Image (tube, rainbow, N blue to C red):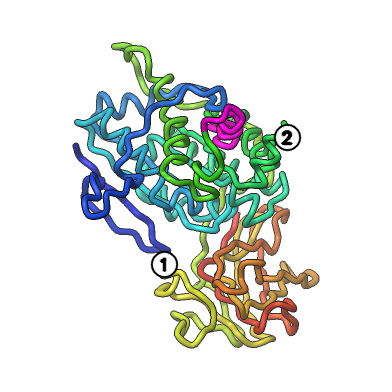
Amino acid sequence: MHTTFTRRIGFASFLIAAALLLTNAATGVVIADEITPTPIDSPHAVLRGDYTNSRLRFERDKVGHVAWLGGSITEMNGYRPMLMRWLQQRYPDTKFTFTSAGIGSTCSTTGAMRLGHDVLADGPVDLFFVEFAVNDDQDAHHTRDECIRGLEGIIRQVRRHNPNADIVVTYFVNEGMLATTQKGDTPLTVEAHDAVAKHYNVSSSNVGAELADRIKAGTMDWKTYGGVHPHPAGNAVAAGMAAGILNKAWSEPLPADAKPTAHPMPAAPLDPLCYDHGRFIDPATASVKSGWTLHVPDWKSIKGSKRERFTSIPMLEATTPGAELTLKFTGHAVGAYVVAGPDAGMIESSVDGGPFTTTDLYHRFSGGLHYPRTVMFATDLPAGDHTVVLRVAATHNDKSHGAAARVMQFVAN
């Protein structure tokens, strides 16, 4: 068994050559790494398209790059390491590179902007798993259009980078989404993401619908499932559904003349404003007029909880109203990937000399946490070269106690 595990922490990455954890002998507690999921044949795990390309890589070439992109459910010790274990046991002689690109609290917009840096920079992906339904719902409160722009941008980028890439989209669930499902309706984020999956003939796994069926049948409940961040039992269902899709796709013997075939890319996206060229822009490229400093913030003096992954990252920081900078970019959308804590302020932005508009950086979770989020200043500009002026507003959210802006990366599309 050969494994290369690429794990993304903030904007740094490192390689760990290691096998997965096996037994927690000290505590006897079952953790996700220890579980090999059983493939689940569920009506809510829908096989679309062909998965011969990844199978050829794993079976014939004996190598494979498998990547996961998502929020904290991807980041946690959950369905991702279970699927890693399942793939390794199915293909014990294959040298896998696993890229884990889950970052808690982030939505599909952030995913589309960081995909190139956090996943595609590691090379073409053979098998790609993505989940953002919960975060687009409870963290970002995305509209349907925003859900589509994020996920469609991700899928188009992956397929442009490697037309042979096989993709599985998973829809996890929170309590509100589960209640909607139990009433016979489809949560907004799931419906939007599934519209994208269907448009690109990509398989999808609706964990919330499977859980609703199991609750109705009396074989599982919300507590056993584990909540928004599932317990091993819940993650085993999610991993089993994804494995079930692949098991079905790979059920017949591989034909001797099988060849890799590019997946067709729909010429027209569902949304022409989707983030299919989403990317980071180095904050060092901004031209500072006043009040902004590129450095690692003095986190010890800043109130609010911090996530370790962000505390060593240089950020373009301003804490006083009137601080101003200019950024040149190419595309039709521009924004910033920020951490927004208890002192988060507001940003005024003007594109190409137009009127200033105000964006509130403060998030409802900012009160006790420096919260990672992507804010967009403009999304529907004419394609081409633009200049945006950003300045810290004199006012701030009533719940905030400051005017801070801390930019990890600018983003554009």
Give the structural element (helix, strand or loop) at label 1.
helix
Answer left or right for 48 relative to 16: right
Residue 233 on image: x %, y %: 43, 40
Magenta segment, prevailing SS (helix, strand or loop):
helix
Let me know if residue 208 is in the magenta part. Answer: yes
> Which residue matches tag 2?
183
Looking at the rendering, the stretch of residues picked out in magenta corresponds to: 205-219
Let me know if residue 214 is in the magenta part. Answer: yes
Outermost right residue? 355
Residue 140 visible, this angle: yes
**Badge 2 amino acid:** Lys
Distance in Å between CA atoms under marks 2 and 1: 39 Å
Residue 319 on image: x %, y %: 60, 85
Residue 161 visible, this angle: no
Crowd tier of the residue under label 2, counting other residues whose Cα lies within 10 Å: few below 14, some 14–19, many 20 or above: few
First in sequence, mark 2 or 1: give its number: 2
- Where residue 386 is drawn, which disc sits there? none
Residue 165, placed above or below residue 295: above
Residue occupying the point 73% across, 34% down: 183
Crowd tier of the residue under label 1, counting other residues whose Cα lies within 10 Å: few below 14, some 14–19, many 20 or above: few
Q: Quadrant of the N terminus?
A: top left
Q: Nearer the viewer, residue 37 or 134?
A: 37
Residue 383 on image: x %, y %: 67, 52
Residue 149 on image: x %, y %: 65, 46
Q: Nearer the viewer, residue 239 or 25?
A: 25
Residue occupying the point 70% across, 77% down: 399
> Which residue matches tag 1?
309
Residue 122, placed above or below residue 9: above
